[in-house]
Image: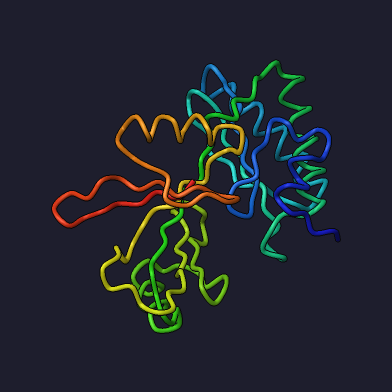
Amino acid sequence: MTIMTPQQFQEAGGTGDWRALNAGADAWFDTRSHLGGAVLVRRVADLAEAAGHHPDIDVRASGVHLRLFSHDVGQLSERDVSLARQISAAAADLGLRADPAAVQRMQIAIDATVAATLAPFWQAAFRFDRVADDRLADPLGRQPRLWFQGMDPPRPLRNRIHLDAGTPWDLVAQRTTALRAAGGRITYENQSRWVRLPRHKGDRPHLGL
């Protein structure tokens, strides 16, 4: 089985409806009703059974959200590319339109000098799985992941908790512009962007894109 980086997944042919976010890939297909969504879900269920690979599915009256992720390797793989192509083809056959702007994946980051000292507490609080030494995840995929960000040395004047907003790569510039208009400013920019809001009564929230 071939492991895929987010960039490799995004550059593979037939994945244009999907966006690689936080180790998985998400897609949203607009529908007019739960019934319309159920028709797509039935198609996806048949494809998933044939492939032996099952996405997470969330059905709403306005659309269907799907997330692909290879649980056995903890990231994307060639299986996800193959199933993404098949799902997109099934949606197109039903006349459904994908809306990549509708997907987002939030992560909660907690500053820690030693993740092992904090992870058991949060794992017990939320009944999450320990998917890595520094990460906890909801076994049902309903809640944001928790990531324990290593701090060396400790930074006592920083917030200990911040939010990472997994944003489709082609929408980062647009989102950054909106955040700047709301008073934020870029504090770090590489493969991701960190936006900081002005300090208010000692609090300085951060947002990672």
Number of numbered tags placed on the structure image: 0
In the picture, measured across the screen, residue 76 lies left or right of residue 107, that is right
Which residue is drawn at the image coordinates 44% and 30% (left, top)? Answer: 177
> Picture coordinates of residue 53 (x, y %)?
75, 52
Which residue is drawn at the image coordinates 34% and 40% (left, top)? Answer: 184
In the picture, measured across the screen, residue 177 lies left or right of residue 53, that is left
Q: Indicate the quadrant containing the N terminus: top left, top right, bottom left or bottom right.
A: bottom right
Which color scheme is applied? rainbow
> Picture coordinates of residue 35 (x, y %)?
56, 22
> Picture coordinates of residue 141 (x, y %)?
52, 54
**In the displayed image of the protein, which residue is found farthest to the left?**
201
> Picture coordinates of residue 88 (x, y %)?
74, 30
Instruction: Judge by depth and name the residue closer to the eye, 164 or 201.
Output: 201
Instruction: Judge by depth and name the residue closer to the eye, 138 or 41.
Output: 138
Which residue is drawn at the image coordinates 45% and 83% (left, top)? Answer: 116
> Quadrant of the rendered structure where residue 40 is?
top right
